[in-house]
Amino acid sequence: MNSELQEIVLAEPRGFCAGVDRAIEIVERAITKFGSPIYVRHEIVHNTYVVNDLKDKGAIFIEDLADVPPGATLVFSAHGVSQAVRQEATARGFSVYDATCPLVTKVHVEVAKLHKEGFEFIMIGHKGHPEVEGTMGQLNEGIHLVEDVHDVASVQLAQQDKIAVVTQTTLSVDDAAEILRAVKLRFPKVREPKQQDICYATQNRQDAVKVLAPTVDILIVVGSPTSSNSNRLRELAQRLGTEAYMVDSPADLQVAWFEGKSRVGLTAGASAPDILVQQVIERLRALGATSVRSIPGVEETINFPLPMGLGNKSMGLGDTPITFQATD
């Protein structure tokens, strides 16, 4: 192995997904249309660069709706919110635009539908993540969180006949499958999602890392520490035996990481903008890399319409069509 960095290999696809693109555009259009400030509940997406850029443009990020003045325009983040948050926003009279990713909304709709049919739910996800809080918060009771295989044994359900599984959209595909197997073993009658809850972008980026990681000496994931899907990419590479690190910006790169490394793989979580990827490439060039190439991957063509009132689309959020990109 050469002692100096030579080649950068880019994963395909990487970076922004359709849900992130849409969420950011909702905030930017709201600022343009209504002027600043525009209030956003929680970080619109989990990326420091994106959040700071929107702050500079006039967005104010809050966690408590009590911090939003009467009559203000409020945007819900891409992660979705509980029914309690929706009801509070309505009661306070805010003008609300919902930037919840339509793939998360799909899970919420499925939970509401099956709940009416008498189902209880097991949700596979990470405790404290806003998407999990939003999905769990669609119901007052009857939804149980499991974070790993061991949690499955402690689930206590009121009945055994109508049980359904839903998942956080940004999980490790392999981990979620392992937990689902444990759920099915304990609850044979469980209903699986009609379509995989883990989103197409998460699946595609993990598939790309599975191809890329074995071919490089080290993998760099561009993403913020709070980004679930970015963390899963780093963990996946490490599980495959490749040294991997996640960076929020080029400044996080450490020279020592690349000692004795000639080929570096580079990917980005679904909430990480391409400008950060390009900045990381320039930093790696400064460290000695002389060439950049991409591996073949799935081409993503999905677009989600904006909410009514923020674009030239005539459909409201509830009418948003959802299509899925093949991942094979």
Image (cartoon, rainbow, N blue to C red):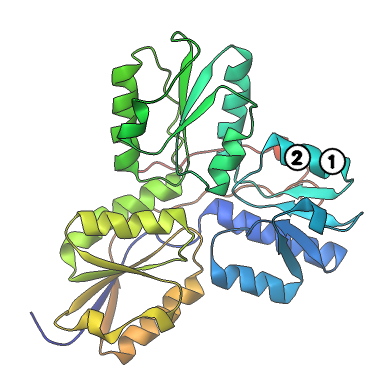
Tag 1 and tag 2, C-beta contact below 8 Å: yes
Q: Is residue 99 left or right of residue 232?
A: right
Residue 327 placement: quadrant: top left
User: What's the residue at 34%, 57% (across, down)?
Assistant: 233
Mark 2 belongs to which amino acid?
Arg
**Residue at the spot of label 2:** 86
Quote the CA–CA distance across marks 1 and 2.
6 Å
Which mark, by number, is residue 90?
1
Residue 272 in picture, x, y percent from top left:
49, 65
Of 284 and 232, nearer the camera is 232
Residue 111 in picture, x, y percent from top left:
58, 26
Q: Is any part of residue 62 visible from this angle?
A: yes
Residue 165 in picture, x, y percent from top left:
45, 26
User: What's the residue at 55%, 53% (across, down)?
Assistant: 18
Q: Is residue 243 left or right of residue 235?
A: left
Q: Is any part of residue 298 visible from this angle?
A: no
Mark 1 belongs to which amino acid?
Thr
User: What's the residue at 57%, 56% (across, down)?
Assistant: 20
User: With respect to residue 109, does 7 lie above or below?
Assistant: below
SS category of the residue bearing label 1:
helix
